[in-house]
Image: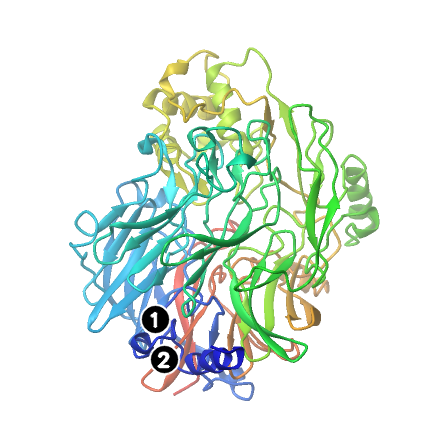
Amino acid sequence: MTEFKGIALSVLCLSIFISSCSDNERALFTASDWPAYGGQNNGQRYSTLTQINRDNVSRLQPAWQFDTDSAGSSQTQPVVVGGVVYGITPNLDVVALDGASGELLWSFSGLDGPSDFMGPSRGLAFWKEGDKEILFAGIVDKLFAIDPGNGELVAEFGDDGALDLRTGLPGDTSRFYVSLSSPGVIYRDTIIVGFRAAESPPAPPGDIRAFDVRTGALVWSFHTIPASGEFGADTWPENARATQGGANAWAGFALDDERGIVYVPTGSAVPDFFGGERTGDNLFANSLIALDASTGERLWHFQAIRHDIWDRDFPAPPSLVTVQREGRAIDAVAQTSKQGYVYLFDRVTGEPLFPIEERAVPTSSIAEEQAAPTQPFPTAPAPFARQELTADMLTTRSPEMNDWAREQFSNFLSAGQFMPFGTEQPTVVFPGFDGGAEWGGSAIDPGRGIIYINSNDIAWTGALAASPDGMGFAESLYQAQCAVCHGTDRQGSPPEFPALTNVSETLSPDEMRDIIRYGIGRMPGFPALAPAAVSGLTDLVLNPESVSSSNIEEDSVPSLSSDGSDVPYRFTGYHRFFDPDGYPAVAPPWGTLNAIDLNTGEYLWKIPFGEHPELKAQGIENTGSENYGGPVLTESGLLFIGATLFDQKFRAYDAATGALLWEYEMPYSGMATPAVYMVDGRQYVVIATSNSRNPRAEQGSAYIAFALPE
């Protein structure tokens, strides 16, 4: 097939909004559907629907609202097939809603533990063949096959409709926290999945697996931590699969259906911030991997960070795009990053379409750490987030705050993206641990080769601390498993990483034990910990002054080879660089929305994205804000996005210019990526909303759909 024919076929498939280009699949879905995470398997977040356009979008209004009766985090981009919206609530119930009215048709719950303590689930997968349909939902460590017509399990799949995603991983799988936070992707009669895992030992290797959609039988597995003799094994210590974990794909995939290639972005190895026990480059952590979707065979890969010691996971699914170079069309794959880079590769060969330079980077000040001597830097497009914090980039909100920020900054080490953490002073991470880009993904204009990216642009800091001798085992376990998020001083970094200093005022011992065992929100569970260890940690957190230093026996905590309590250096915790009033201590913008021409690498526009309402009331505008969730694009030239943390607004922009055309203040923030669909000739845009990331706001969650007046 020539390049021209390939493009023509892609345009044809796009025009009827399907997730594949085969004759059989062409009839499965229509332009009215949104049948996959990202809209289609190609991850473009693009709809061909044009009823809502630049001229009438100002008249958009709520069409229906479905309240989930939960105050947790709602991050799901629903799938829509045949006029039914399928979503997941914060308490991880799967729901089917009438797409025209929002009426609940059925709900399904598959949880084993307390529903309030589970992490997010960002989407679902839909398989269809003839009159057979299956809706796949990842609920923590289970993959459920659900009949989309009635919400009942498909008994032929797995164990009476459920597949334990820990099955087949090496070691004692009962000890692993595994969660399908982003959905799998459907290729023919298989579903391809990754998973979220703990970020401290013990954690499983992040195998990518394909399962038969009818039976749940394993079809293939790709080892992101290679086994002995496999490609890349020499970039790890010997027998790494038995002792190391992570390198997992938690963000989701993109799939070239016609070629049968799945594109897999992976995260960092465990533990995130000290790599002394995982010497080497650690393939395939922090990589974009192209796999044969039929066999799992590696076709090509690119590792963005060698030996990651900064937790720089690839945070979002890649997107497929076709670009023009010297009059020639090239099918490409684009991958965004926390660092603020866009990487662009030939979809088939893996050749970079903009030069990537290998540059020397700083060495570690810690003798036990062997940081990589060089890292790859894309030369274009220019980063969509700032790269190195300097004193002249600090807040100017007031002279007093600038003075405060300068004093703090004088104690920091700020030397760009790849400065290893030390023990002497906090190191600036800019953009912060939450990006740059985050999990919401990017939108693609397939006809013009343009990518639309929302970005965070605030600074965080981090540091390592040597593990002290003579520490009691309860405290040692806390420092190994909990301090990475809640801090060695237990101050945390609210709201994602709450302080534990006064937690006894809000949580009972039973509630704390459940949180440790099952996880809550962003926090993973710790199933490896024996009951004695869980009780010891509970006592330590709730009553730190009264706990004996030897209240837990070491043999009560099984390990992968280690429980992490003997790691010589520990991360002291995530710390946003915020001023005393709770605002970023760097100059705005704190969040941006970007349009980049991937044909040339040039920016078409870049605007501040999001507001702090109380600052706007003071006349301080265009600050931007933290944002989570992504955009969707329609053929009528509208870019829809929620995502902003504090203003709770849903917005529509002119994709050509970045001009704001419409906005609506919702009851909760749109911390998810929208979906676009049509029912009975009426176009809708639906988004999941919640306020869990903003504890000062009224708590709640709802799906809200918008449409033009009837």
Q: Is residue 305 above or below residue 424?
A: below
Q: Position of residue 353 (x, y in %)?
A: 64, 64
- Kind of residue indicated by mark 1: Val
For label 2, the residue is: 32
For label 1, the residue is: 80
Q: Is residue 429 visible?
A: no
- Kind of residue indicated by mark 2: Ser
- Give the residue drawn at x 32%, y 23%: 531
Mark 2 or mark 1, earlier in chain? 2
Q: Is residue 349 left or right of residue 161?
A: right
Q: Is residue 272 above or below residue 619?
A: above
Q: Contact (CB < 8 A) between labels 2 and 1?
A: yes
- Give the residue drawn at x 53%, y 81%: 4
> Dividing the picture into quarters, in which one does residue 555 lie?
top left
Q: Position of residue 693 (x, y in %)?
A: 51, 51
> Dividing the picture into quarters, in which one does residue 132 lie?
bottom left
Q: Nearer the viewer, residue 267 or 219?
A: 219
Q: Position of residue 640 (x, y in %)?
A: 52, 73
Q: Position of residue 515 (x, y in %)?
A: 38, 35
Q: Nearer the viewer, residue 392 or 272?
A: 272
- In terms of secondary structure, where does tag 2 sit? loop
Q: Is residue 363 left or right of residue 42?
A: right
Quarter in which the C terminus is drawn? bottom left
- Label 2 neighbour load within 10 Å: few <14, some 14-19, many 20+: many
